[in-house]
Image (cartoon, rainbow, N blue to C red):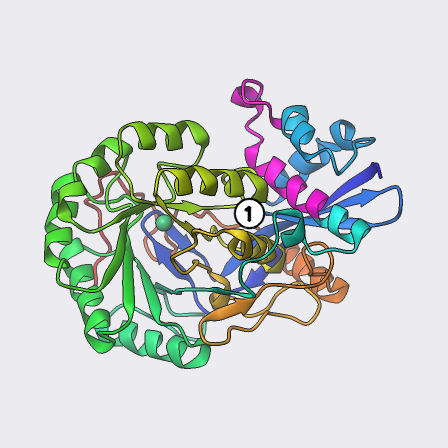
Amino acid sequence: MKIVDIRATTVTVPLEAPLRHSNGAHWGRFVRTIVEVEADNGLIGLGELGGGGESAEAAIRGLREYLVGHDPFALEALRFAIANPTASLYNNRTQLLAAVEFACLDLIGLHLGVPVYDLLGGKLRDRVPFASYLFFRLADQAGRGEVRTPDQLVAHAKELREAHGFTVHKLKGGVFPPEYELECYRALASVWPDDRFRYDPNGSMSVAEARRFGQAIRDLPNEYFEDPTWGLNGMRQLRDLGIPLATNTVVVNFEQLATNVRDPAVDVILLDTTFWGGIRPCVKAAAVCETFQLGVAVHSSGELGIQLATMLHLGAVLPNLTYAADAHYHHLRDDVIVGGKMPYVDGTIAVPDGPGLGVRLDRERVARYAELYRELGGYPYDRDPARPGWYPLIPNDRWADPS
Ligand SMILES: [Mg+2]
C-alpha cells in the first residue's frame, strides 16, 4: 500500500454554548481540520487536527510531497520523515504528524479488516469511561445556556449527569477569581458526595494561590488537582498538599516525562493523541508511566468523532487507565461522522469495533460544516468575546467578574 494523496477540509461544528477557559473561550463552535489520506488501493484513512482553518489546511497540503509514495504501515519511519526531533525545531510538525498517524492507522486497519485497537495490542475494555467536563459558559445567541453561578453550574452538571450517566466531574476553571471558583467547586462536590471530582484552572494560579485553593479542597473526593499552577517547578512545590497532581501542559513529550520521572512533580499524565504526535506515542508514554507507577488518563483538546475514535482506541488498550477520560464531546451539537454523535451510556462510550478507527465521514455533514466554516470563519481561542481587548497573565490576576 502506498499513499497517493492527502486532503484537508476545515469544518466548524456548533457547541451548545460558548465555553470559557483561562485563556479565553471556544466561541460557540469548534473549528477542526479533517484530514483524508488516500492510498493506491482506493482506501481513505481519516485524521483530524484542531483549529487552524486555512493555515492548517495549507500545512497538511504541504506534506503531500513528503507523503506520496510512503507506505502507511511504515509508522516509525513516518515520524522521522516528517517530524524528526531536530528538524521539528524549525517546522513544528508534531500535531500534523498526529493527524497523519491517525489516518495511516485507519488505512492499515481498513486494509487488514481489523480495528485500530488490535494494531495496538488488543483491547482490554469495550467501553471507555468519561468525566463530565464542566465549563463556565456564556449564554448562546438566544440568551440561553449561561453557566456562571454555583446554582447554574450544579443545574448544568445535573443535566449532563442525568443524560449521560457521569460519576466523575471535571470543572474547567481559571475564569473567575479563585475564591469564587472554590465556592463553585465545593457546591458541585456537595451534591454528589460519592462521585469524584477534578479541578483544572489551566495553570493560571500562582503557586501561593494554588496552595490556598488546594488546602481548601483537601476534604473533598478529589481525583486530582489538574495544572493548578504553571510549570514543573511550580507543580513540584505543591506535592505536599496530598492531592494527586495531573497535567496536560507541562508533560507533553518524552523529554518532559523523563524529567518528571527523575525529579517528580506530577502524579498523573493526561495523554493527548494530538499533543504527543499520535496514538502510538501515547501508548509508549503510558508504558513509561506504568513502569514508574505514574497515573495516566486520556486528555481532550476538543474533538469531533475522528479524534474521539483515537481517544477510544487509546483508552481501550491502556492497562493502567485508572482514571476516566476527558472529552469536550458532549458540548457539541453534532458530528461529521456517519450516524452522528456517538452516545454515552453510564458515562462511557463504546470503543468502535469496525475496521480501522471504526468511524466514516458523513459527506453531507462535512459539506454542511465546511460551508458553516466559510460563513463564520475562525475564532481566537485566546480571546474572550465577553471582554474585548482582554488577555490573561500567567499567573493571572485579570479574572472575569462573576457578578
Ligand atoms: Mg487540562
Q: Which residue is mark 1?
A: 50
Q: Left or right: where does residue 109 sit relative to residue 135?
A: right
Element type where label 1 sits in the image: strand
Is 234 drawn above or below residue 150 in the view shown?
A: above
Res 266 quadrant in image: top left
Percent across and percent down for residue 387 are 32, 53
Q: Left or right: where does residue 246 sit relative to residue 208?
A: right
Percent across and percent down for residue 169 are 33, 66
Residue located 34% across and 67% down the image = 168
Percent across and percent down for residue 343 are 56, 73
Toward the bottom, the furthest residue is 162
Res 68 quadrant in image: top right
Res 196 quadrant in image: bottom left
Q: Which residues are magenta?
A: 83-105
Residue located 63% across and 53% down the image = 117
Is 250 drawn above or below residue 10 in the view shown?
A: above
